[in-house]
Amino acid sequence: MTGKVYLVGAGPGAPDLLTVRAARLLAEADIVFHDALVPEPIVALAARAEKVAVGKRCGRHSTAQRFINKRLADAARTHKVVVRLKGGDPLVFGRAQEEIAYLRSQDIRVEVVPGITAALAASASLGTSLTQRGIARSVAFVTPRVGAEEGPSRWLEAAMAADTVAIYMAAHEAPTIAAALIAAGKSAATPIAIAEGATLPAERTAHGTLGELPDLVRGATGPVVILVGEVYRALAETLVPAKVGIQAA
């Protein structure tokens, strides 16, 4: 028997933000390989499945990607429904393409089930459009992080070209990011917003300026998305002034 592998987006964390298809597949799954950032209530929806943690977290022990690829292929040879559960959307900084390519090379069927990515969830929590009419007509999703044996990231070039920028997996590099953007010509007064754990009960947010970025992410321990652009200027006019460190929403 050869089953099918579903690369499923778990979204930003709130279980009721899963797609209907994602929830159905979790209920039908024989085995689920889940990332570290997927909350337990979502993993628990796979009530009848064997559950395998294959998470990746910055600065912590991680499962090698080649090992995950092989485990998925092996599972598809003995199970009908194999779910690879990824935080956010599988195709946004989720290394899904490596898994897709490997599974296809093994003649194993694979399907991607989209999820809500962090930038969209954070903007929803902040009540601010990434593409506010008259202000922003382009959005860039970037990350400065690069893996071993990968070429340098061109995140700065993309960030400078877009009206609104969502920076992923970057909280630990906040001082370097702020300095790079300012050196490239972005004003230190450019409005920014920060969201940690968007949509989760412990969600925290902050807003301020690019020059304040290192202080705004101070104290963050969970997944953070940094949002940069003029669309966030209104936050300073409608919300209380930003405080040092990320704040409870």
Image (cartoon, rainbow, N blue to C red):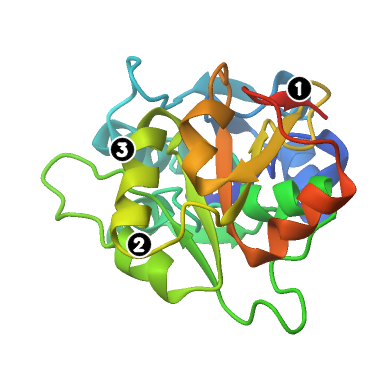
Residue 151, quarter of picture: bottom left
Q: Nearer the viewer, residue 49 or 89?
A: 89
The residue carrying pointer 2 sits among few (fewer than 14), some (14 to 19) or many (20 or more) residues within 10 Å by Cα, namely: few
Give the percent coordinates (x, y) of residue 215.
Answer: 52, 27
Left or right, 221 with reference to 159: right
Which numbered circle lies on residue 70?
3
Q: Is residue 160 above or below residue 95?
A: below
Gap in Å between the C-alphas at discs 1 and 2?
29 Å
What residue does disc 1 label?
44
Which SS class for mark 3? helix
Which SS class for mark 1? loop
Type of the residue with mark 1? Ala
Q: Nearer the viewer, residue 82 or 142?
A: 142
Give whichever of discs 3 and 1 has the lower sequence position.
1
Farthest residue toward the left?
Answer: 149
Left or right, 32 with reference to 125: left
Give the percent coordinates (x, y) of residue 65.
Answer: 30, 37
Give the percent coordinates (x, y) of residue 99.
Answer: 37, 51
Type of the residue with mark 3? Lys
**Residue 92 shows in this picture:** yes
Residue 234, quarter of picture: bottom right
Q: Is residue 122 above or below residue 163?
A: above
The residue carrying pointer 1 sits among few (fewer than 14), some (14 to 19) or many (20 or more) residues within 10 Å by Cα, namely: few
Numbered disc in front, either 3 or 1: 1
Type of the residue with mark 2? Arg
Which numbered circle lies on residue 104?
2
- Residue at 74% in and 53% down: 123
Residue 41, quarter of picture: top right
